Amino acid sequence: MAIVSDVLMNVKKRNLNEPEFLQAVQEVLESLEPVIEMHPEYKDAGILERMVEPERQVIFRVPWVDDKGIVRVNRGFRVQFNSAIGPYKGGIRFHPSVYIGIIKFLGFEQIFKNSLTGLPIGGGKGGSDFDPKGKSDGEVMRFCQSFMTELYKYVGADVDVPAGDIGVGAREVGYMYGQFKRITGSYEGVLTGKGLSFGGSLVRTEATGYGLVYFVNEMIKAKGYELKDKKVVVSGSGNVAIYAVQKLQEFNAKVIAMSDSNGYIYDEKGINIATIKKLKEVERKRISEYVKEHPHAEYHEGHRGIWNIKCDIALPSATQNEIDENSARQLALNGCFAVGEGSNMPSTPEAIKVFQTNNILFAPAKAANAGGVATSALEMSQNSMRMSWTFEEVDFKLQEIMKNIYKNCIKAANDYGFGDNLAVGANIAGFLKVADAMYKQGVV
Ligand SMILES: NC(=O)C1=CN([C@@H]2O[C@H](COP(=O)(O)OP(=O)(O)OC[C@H]3O[C@@H](n4cnc5c(N)ncnc54)[C@H](OP(=O)(O)O)[C@@H]3O)[C@@H](O)[C@H]2O)C=CC1
Ligand SMILES: O=C(O)CCC(=O)C(=O)O
């Protein structure tokens, strides 16, 4: 369809050297052709053209002083992509690979994901090329304070509400919140993922991993499977991976491998998640240390090798494009029947084709990992009401949200003739709400 290919061509021309952003846009736009055909008013209102252009992008200098007294300079980013259905919402990533193209791809994905939650949150994302690995708490604090000293001008409880992502957890959110409060004098829900003693929500820490497992459970249940006794491989060993593994074990699935950016561990008896939590959340060590406490387990260098392990279900939960075509083929050859994306855009387009041609059940990131941001929106609600819900209350709401996302994705896929293709269904269902809001708000 001309409109979709024209918009895509323009995006390619205007965003050179941003392959991750182009990949994300192409994947969404290609699934929207039948929607635009059914809604010619969206074409006339330039909805697609406006949706692929961020409302605002801020790039700033982040100077800080390391423990040796040396001045360091990093680059900070916040992309406020779309506020049609609510204040911008999305995490902050600290990783040396961060540049504007990564933040734009993540911000673009966030528009549709946030819409799928059914809650009033727009799409945004931020970050820096700062690497927290190997830095002292003092260095991380000074960096976060400097980052927020610029960012505070652009955020606010009703404007833009950042949270964590790779390299940003409770420690970093706490330091950023402290600095925001110190500069503005305002005690407001400007960040989510806050500590429980200052406005954080119960379950937010666990939410993305738990939500991923709730979603995958719905998807496989619909085909007559259950998680019990299934062998599962989960990549990463950060926030998403750890709580996905914890929930999988509650469902009596057997998680046999996890990884970090250096390599992966294989434990045929089942991963001991308490050891991983200690190594990663408390000691901030490498996953290779796991075998010291569990000598029967194996450690292998290189994170991609994890996809060669025979499993029933794979949950990529580390980073973008971590499953390429070869890894996908290996998973299929080994009999893997379901893939659930915990990380954002972990499967290359070629890998997704392999899953589809091999009839592997596929839960796309926008839907499957939406539990984190959904619970962030629940944290925003609690902050606005000046109250806190119990763990059980928030977890119940999270389960209902993930079930609804699953139902809505299936319905959208069905309505537009794509059967039970959840990837297309997620794009269409996420798009429809945002497009309707943009259309009714006029050309802004
Ligand atoms: N936190 C959240 O609520 C949400 C996160 N996500 C997505 O989930 C993914 C993981 O995020 P999160 O768990 O929060 O991040 P963390 O920083 O807590 O953990 C990231 C994990 O992925 C590994 N990793 C990072 N980069 C690479 C790489 N280039 N190659 C291989 N492994 C890598 C890290 O290893 P190492 O320690 O060696 O770097 C670490 O084990 C990201 O894609 C994020 O965008 C999605 C929705 C919500
Ligand atoms: O909780 C949030 O606002 C951010 C979650 C996030 O970054 C994501 O969904 O990728």
Image: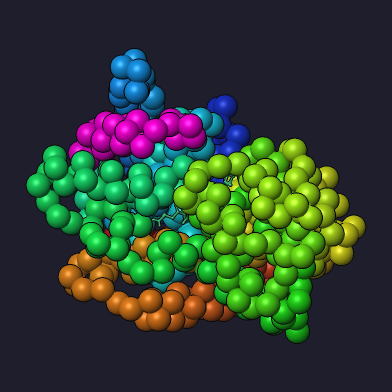
In the figure, 35 relative to 135: above or below? below
Task: Determine if residue 251 is in view.
Answer: yes
**Residue placed at 43% from the left, 61% from the top?**
205
| Residue 343, percent from left and from top | 58, 53
Part of the protein shown in magenta: 130-153
Residue 5 in the image: state x and y as whole percent.
62, 44
Which sits in the foreground, 412 or 103? Answer: 103
| Quadrant where ligand 2 appears | bottom left
**Measuring 70% from the left and 41% from the top, which residue is drawn there?**
263
Q: Quadrant of residue 35?
A: bottom right
365 displayed left or right of 131? right
Residue drawn at 40 percent across, 81 percent down:
392
Q: Residue furthest left?
A: 185
Q: Does the magenta portion include 135?
A: yes
Q: Seen from this angle, which residue lies furthest bottom?
A: 224
**Camera-side residue: 312 or 428?**
312
**In the displayed structure, does residue 296 sit left or right of residue 104?**
right
Q: Is residue 365 magenta?
A: no
230 versus 124 height, above or below: below
Q: Main secondary structure of the magenta part?
A: helix
Q: Nearer the viewer, residue 406 or 425?
A: 406
In the image, what residue occupies the spot 46% across and 53% down?
Answer: 110
